[in-house]
Amino acid sequence: MNKHVSHLAGLGLAAMIAGWSASAAADIPKSPEVEESGKLTIANTIDFAPFEYMDAEGKPTGIIIELAGEVAKLVDAELDVQRTPFPSMIPGLAAGRFKIAWETFSANSDRLKQVDFVMFIKAGIAASTSPEKKNEFTGDLPLCGKRVGVSAGSASDFLVDTLNAECAQEGKEAIDKSVFNSSTDIIQAVLADRIDARMDDATASSYFEVTSKGKLVVLPTLYDVAPLGLAIAKGDKPTADMMVAALAELFENGTYRSILEKYGMGAYEIKEPYFVGDMEALRAE
């Protein structure tokens, strides 16, 4: 093939790719808010690496921020990240202050009374401690009698209450739970020996084990493996349809897997994004 023909073929391929991209974007329904504002607005803590955090230049980054940026491109909108404390997210959705709270929410019956979810990843919950204390966590209930830090209102917060009941049933010392608003504060509390361990999403725990360079280690017991999702206001079908369709495109074109693998989280991908409006809709992954 001569250079002229090759050039034309290249142009043809580029046009085909552009056409596919335009077609994919055209198939994604925009919510009224995105259509009117030109913005994809999400509530996010920007404080839960590797999902969201500030980079060295002070810009938000991480798995969720990158996924949200790709969704914004697909719906031809500007990404607007509103920094919001985690405990304020579900009340904020219920009150209509924003339409999307993009964190790694686990679904439970209480939350589903107020919000719906779009699942996009899976994980369990794990405890992290210092290397010096790792061998102190033994037996079937290794957290009994330990000082454990959790994020307010998170799945870990509720899990520790459940584990505490098991400790009492077995006649073991209670877990001393401390509640924090910042993931960073929990880590500092472990490092300063104010608490013995932190309970957190297993993906984030694995990430911090690497980035702390050995200052934190993940304990082997994994709790409550389940799908995790972003939250939207109860019954907000236009936003739900938009997010499911946009994420489905990112799953299909490989962007989703690429972003997860960039942060070492490929093991936590799910087969496809899906809507959850009640507990029966949850899928085993």
Image (cartoon, helix red, strand yellow):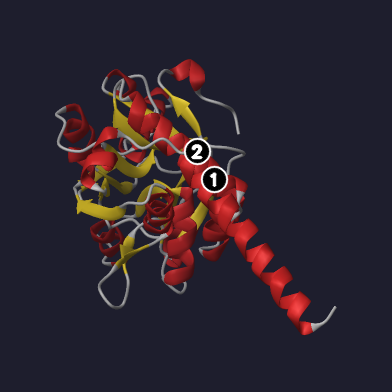
Q: How far apart are marks 1 and 2 (CA)?
A: 6 Å
Give the image quarter of residue 115: top left
Q: Nearer the viewer, residue 34 or 147?
A: 34
Residue 71 lies, with reference to residue 10, above or below; the image says above
Residue at (50, 20) in percent of width and height:
281
Residue at (46, 62) in percent of width and height:
207
Residue 274 lies, with reference to residue 62, above or below; the image says above
x%, y% of residue 226? Answer: 51, 34
Q: Which of 134 and 48 is in front in this view?
A: 48
Please name the residue that numbered disc 1 is placed on: 23
Q: Nearer the viewer, residue 86 or 164?
A: 86
x%, y% of residue 85? Answer: 19, 47
Quadrant position of the C terminus in the picture: top right
Q: Can residue 27 be seen in this view?
A: yes
Residue at (23, 33) in percent of width and height:
90
x%, y% of residue 68? Answer: 38, 52
Residue at (61, 46) in percent of width and height:
252
Amino acid carrying label 1: it is Ser
Tag 2's secondary structure? loop
Please name the residue that numbered disc 2 is placed on: 27
Q: How many tags in the picture?
A: 2
Tag 1's secondary structure? helix
Amino acid carrying label 2: it is Asp
Q: Are marks 1 and 2 in contact (CB under 8 Å)?
A: yes
State left or right for residue 140 relative to residue 97.
right
State left or right for residue 50 relative to residue 12.
left
